[in-house]
Image (tube, rainbow, N blue to C red):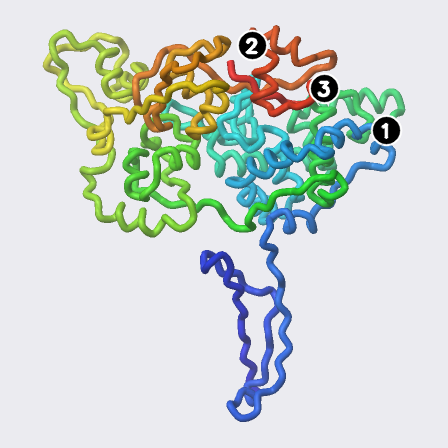
Amino acid sequence: MYKIYIFIFLFLFNGCSAITSKEILSIDSQSITAEEPEEIESNFVEVPFDIWERIRVELTLTIPEDQIAATSLYRERLYKNQSAVNRISKSGQRYLHHTLSRAEALGLPVELALLPFVESEFDPYAKSVDGATGIWQFMPATGKEWGLKTNWWYDGKKDVLASTEAALQFLTYLNKKFDGDWLLAMAAYNTGPTRVNRAIRKNKRQDKPTRFWDLDLPKETTAYVPKLLVLCELIKDPNSFGVNLPSIANRPYFQRVKIPGQLDLMQAADLAGLKPETIYELNPGFNQWATDPSGPHYLLLPIGVSDRFITQLESLDQKDLVRWDRYKIRRGDNLYRIASRYKIEVAVLKEINGMDSDLIIAGKEIMVPRGAAWANNQEPRERVYKVLKGDTLWNISKKFKVSIEDVVLWNELNIATPLQIDQEVKIFSRYERIRQDVPSRELRTMLYPVKSGDTISRIASKFDISSAQIQEWNEIEDVSKIFPGQVLKLFL
C-alpha cells in the first residue's frame, strides 16, 4: 500500500514566507476518492506571530533563589516603566530576528541573542568610552582576533552579519573555556577571560564558591549578567512587571543580496527603490559612499525589495557601477585637493596608487574611485527648518529621523547652547551626511556605564553637558533611579 506524504505549509504575512510544518500528515492513498474521503487527522505546529512568544518558550537561564534580592535593583528599573520597555522593543525590530535565528541554528541558548540589548540596545553605531563598537560592542583588538576586518571603506564590528557570527563564535569559545558555564562565558565576554579567571583563582584560594554570583568582578560586569536575566524575566512575564511588551513580528526584517563588486550606496538605493537612509541603516559596516572593493560583496535589503534590486542590477552595464578612473594631474594639484574632490582620504589614495610620498607631477595619471551615482548626485538635498518654541536637538532629530550628531555637524552647532526660536537649521539625509563636505568637528555617541556614587548632575559636569540633556537623551523620568552598571547614551 502506497503512502502519500502531504506537507502542510503555513502561509504567513501576506505570502512573504512559507513555513513547513514539523508534523507530516500520512494518508492512505486508496482512501482519497471524491465519493468517500476518509477522515484525516492533522497536527499543525503553530508558528508564533510574535517573536517574544518564540523566545519565551526557549529561555532556560534563571536567577538563583539566593540572588533574587540582589537583582531587585534591575527589576525596579523596568517595573511599571512602559517607556523603557517600549524602547527595548523598538530597538530589537531590525536585528533581533537575525541574532535569534543564528543562535538557534548554532544550538546556543537564546539568551545570547538578547545580549545586544544590554551591550548597545542593538545600535550598530554605538561606541563605548573604551572604543568598543557595534551591536556586540567589539573592541578593535578582539574584533581583529575574531576575523572582523576594518579599513577606510568598511568596519566589520558594525556589520550586523559579520559581528553576530564573530560574537557567537567568541561566546562558544568562552563557554568551553569555562566548562560549559554560560554565565561565566558572558561575564568573560564583557570583561575578558583573564579577569574572570583571576577572580575564580582568588575564590578557590579562599575556599569560596566560583559561581558568577560569588566572584569579585568589575561593577559593570557584576551588573551585566543580571541585567540580561532580568530582561529574560520581563519577556517571560511582562504582566508581573506591570507593563505591556510591544509585539515584534516573528519574521526577518532584511535579506542578504549578493552584489558583483564595489557598488555606490546611493545607486543601490535607486536600484532598490529605497531612500538612501534605509541602505545606510541596514548596512552600517560600510563607512563611505560605496561598498568595500575587496568585500564583503553583499548588501542587506528590506524583505520584499530584493527581486526589484536584482533585476535592476542585472540590467546595468559594468561601466555604470563604481569604476576606477584615471585622473590626469593638473598644474597646481596636490593630493589633498584630489582626495577632497573624490571624498577619499589622502592615505587611501596613496595606498591605491602605491605612492610612498605626497609628491605628484602634472601630466601623470593616478587611479581614483568614481561611479555613475557619485558623479550625478554631488549636490546635497537641503531643507531648512525654523526652530519653534520648545524645540530641542533631540526632538528635531526625531522629527526628521536623523541623529543629533547629524544636526550638529550640518549646522556647526554647540550642543551645550540652547536653540533660539526662528533659528534656521539645515537638514539633509544621512546620505548627504556621509558624502557632503562637513565641518571637521566631530560628535559621537558614547555609551557611559554608571559607576558607584554617580549622579546625573555629576556625570553632566564631568562631560560639560547639562543634566536635562542626559535625562532627555535617555528618557529618564526619575533621576534618583540610575544605578551602577546602567549604560547611558551621551552625545559628545
For disc 2, the marked residue is 465
Cβ atoms under marks 1 and 3 closer than 8 Å: no
Vertical arrangement, residue 2 with respect to residue 265, above or below: below
Amino acid at the residue labelled 2: Ile
Q: Residue at x 57, y 34 (%)?
A: 167
For disc 3, the marked residue is 484
Measure how far apart labels 1 and 2 are at the Cα level. Answer: 43 Å
- Name the element at disc 2: loop
Measure how far apart labels 1 and 3 are at the Cα level. Answer: 24 Å
Q: Tell me residue 126's x, y (percent).
A: 52, 25
Q: Tell me residue 480's x, y (percent).
A: 73, 18
Vertical arrangement, residue 290 with respect to residue 103, above or below: above
Q: Count neighbours of disc 3 (C-alpha within 10 A) and say few if under 14, some if 14 to 19, many if 20 or more.
A: some
In the depicted view, which residue is nearer to us: 484 or 155? Answer: 484
| Horizontal relation, residue 282 to residue 165: left or right | left
Cβ atoms under marks 2 and 3 closer than 8 Å: no
In the depicted view, which residue is nearer to us: 283 or 105? Answer: 283
In the depicted view, which residue is nearer to us: 326 or 449? Answer: 449
Tell me the number on the disc at residue 209: 1
Q: Residue at x 39, y 30 (%)?
A: 286
Amino acid at the residue labelled 3: Pro
Q: Residue at x 40, y 10 (%)?
A: 441
Instruction: From the image, state whether disc 2 or disc 3 is nearer to you.
Output: 2
